[in-house]
Image (tube, grey):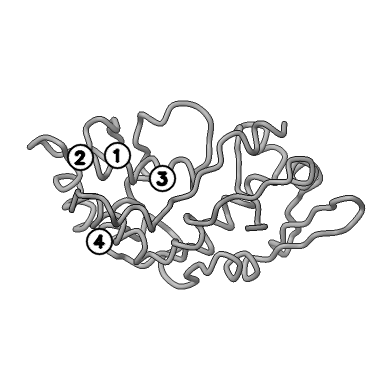
Amino acid sequence: MASSLISSSHHVDFDSVFGMDDAALVQMFESLIATGLKEFLGCPAVFYEATLTEFFTNGSVRKDGMVVSTIRGTTVEISESMFAAVFELPTEGLTDLSDFPKNLVFDAHSLFSESKEQVSISCLKKELKIQYRLLHDILAKTIYVKAGSFDAVTRDRFMLMTEITFDVKVNWSNLLFSVFKDMVTPAIRRRRVTRFRSVVC
């Protein structure tokens, strides 16, 4: 179980990005910083494998939405506000991606496309321009953590790529804490082989 939780930790080294000679990639990373995710994505993971495994093994979500667990007999409680504060996450903005502005989604179909043809919301990553392939991978591996192929672009990742590109405000605290809660919910954890960064950075 431990390897499924921490097999591949990822963080973005923002300082090295701005030395790149590719204006489109640099602009994409500037857009990513503007979302308020810099502390979350740029936080190098510090893992204590046994402790992290114990946290997820014993973890659950209380009715009040608090994530609780025990580590070596000590109770650990993590609220959404605590989670947001640790990673300096924005707490205002969209909480439902279906409320996303339709005109921006329409524009993204052309903007993201490597060819002159519009891409669909559920397309293959190879159909995207290189900077959006990279953005897709960052979202897939750090936000929607999962095992398996990353070749297919999902609706949620497409919508978040659009948000980042067009600077639409999203309540990242709510979105990421929901992912975190899924990871400590045993039924969901069994269906998804997941990994997550330690809160200790």
The numbered dot on residue 129 is 2
Label 4 and label 1: CA atoms lie apart by: 16 Å
Label 3 residue SS: helix
Q: Which quadrant would residue 31 be assigned to in this image? A: bottom left
Confirm or deny contact between disc 4 and disc 1 (CB under 8 A): no
In primary-sequence order, the first of circles 3 and 4 is 3
- The residue located at (70%, 45%) in the rendering is 185
Label 2 residue SS: loop
Residue 5 vs residue 131: left or right? right
Three-letter residue code for mark 3: Ile
* Rendered location of residue 53, percent (x, y): 75, 41
The numbered dot on residue 166 is 4
Label 3 and label 4: CA atoms lie apart by: 17 Å
Residue picked out by circle 3: 138
Label 2 and label 4: CA atoms lie apart by: 16 Å
Three-letter residue code for mark 1: Arg
Three-letter residue code for mark 2: Lys
* Rendered location of residue 82, percent (x, y): 65, 69
Label 2 and label 1: CA atoms lie apart by: 6 Å
Confirm or deny contact between disc 2 and disc 1 (CB under 8 A): yes
In primary-sequence order, the first of circles 2 and 4 is 2
Q: Nearer the viewer, mark 3 or mark 4?
A: 3
Q: Say which quadrant the C terminus sits in.
A: bottom right
- The residue located at (50%, 67%) in the rendering is 89
In primary-sequence order, the first of circles 1 and 3 is 1
Is disc 3 surrounded by few (<14), some (14 to 19) or many (20+) residues within 10 Å? Answer: some
Q: Say which quadrant the N terminus sits in.
A: top right
Q: Is residue 58 above or below residue 103?
A: above
- The residue located at (36%, 63%) in the rendering is 33
Work out which residue is located at the far right of the displayed protein and give it. Answer: 73
